[in-house]
Image (cartoon, rainbow, N blue to C red):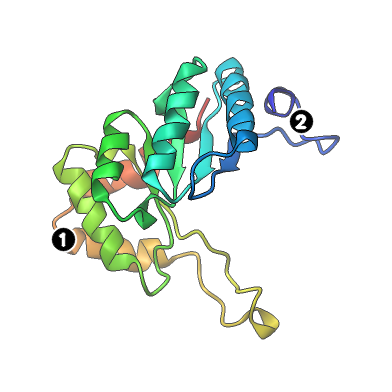
Amino acid sequence: MQAELEGQIEQSGVQAGFIKLSAGDNGLTPCETKILHAAARAAAATGAAIGSHTIQGRVVRDQLDIIENSGYTAERFIWIHAMVEEKMELNLELARRGVWIEYDSIGDGVNDDRILSRILQMLDAGLGGHLLLSQDRGSYDPAQPGGGAPRPYTYINEQFLPKLRASGVDDLTIHKMTHQNPFLAFAR
C-alpha cells in the first residue's frame, strides 16, 4: 500500500490517492484486521486517508480503535455508507471522535429524506465539518440492458442542495460540505 501511495500502482504511472477497504457486518475478521493494521501503517507513513465501506457503526468503532492503536488518527478515516447504520447516535459518536461521515446514495429515490435528516442532526450537533456527500453511482446501471436510463452526475447540485437550502442550511455551510470537507478529507 505504501509503495502505491508514494510511487505508482503497478506500472500504471498512477499514484494511489488514498486507501479503500471494507469490513463485514458481523465484526472484523482476522483478515480484515490484518489489512486494517497494514492500512494504518501505510497511511501513517504517507498521510493518506483510509476510507472503509462499512455498514455497522459498532464495526467502525472497532476499526477506529485499531487505527488509533496502530498510531494513526481518526481525522484521516472516512466511514463510507454511514447513513445505512440504524442508530444515528453512532454517526454522531464517531464524528465526535474525528471520523469523516460519508452519506451516499443521494438521488437513489430512497435515501434523500433520511440523509437530509441526518445532515441536519449533524449540523445541529456542530459536526458539519465531518460530513461528506456522494451520489455513489455511475451514470448507468450495469444490471440493466444497455445500462438502463442514464442517471446524471448533477443530482446533488440540481436537486439535493436546493432541499438543504429549503431546510435552512446556508450557502456557507453547503460550500463547506461540498468543497472544503472533501479537500480536507482526501488531501495529503
The residue carrying mark 2 is 8
Q: Nearer the viewer, residue 73 or 66?
A: 66
Residue occupying the point 44% across, 51% down: 55
Q: Examine the image and state in which quarter residue 156 appears.
A: bottom left
* Residue 182 visible in the shown view: no
Element class at badge 2: loop
* Residue 32 visible in the shown view: yes
Q: Is residue 137 above or below residue 65?
A: below
Residue 173 is situated, as x and y percent measured from the top left of the image, at 23, 44
Q: Quadrant of the N terminus?
A: top right
Residue occupying the point 69% across, 23% down: 2
Task: Spot the residue most to the bottom.
Answer: 145
Q: Is residue 75 above or below residue 70?
A: below
Earlier sequence position, callout 2 versus callout 1: 2
Q: Nearer the viewer, residue 64 or 124?
A: 64
Residue 179 is situated, as x and y percent measured from the top left of the image, at 38, 42
Amino acid type of disc 1? Answer: Ser
Crowd band around label 2 with a 10 angstrom C-alpha radius: few (<14), some (14–19), many (20+): some
Residue 147 is situated, as x and y percent measured from the top left of the image, at 65, 78
Q: Left or right? Give the position of 169 relative to 134.
A: left
Q: Left or right? Give the position of 92 relative to 143.
A: left
The residue carrying mark 1 is 167
Q: CA distance from mark 2 to mark 1?
A: 44 Å
Residue occupying the point 50% across, 34% down: 186
Element class at badge 1: loop
Amino acid type of disc 2? Answer: Gln
Crowd band around label 1 with a 10 angstrom C-alpha radius: few (<14), some (14–19), many (20+): few
Q: Nearer the viewer, residue 125 or 167?
A: 125
Residue occupying the point 82% across, 39% down: 12
Total marks in image: 2
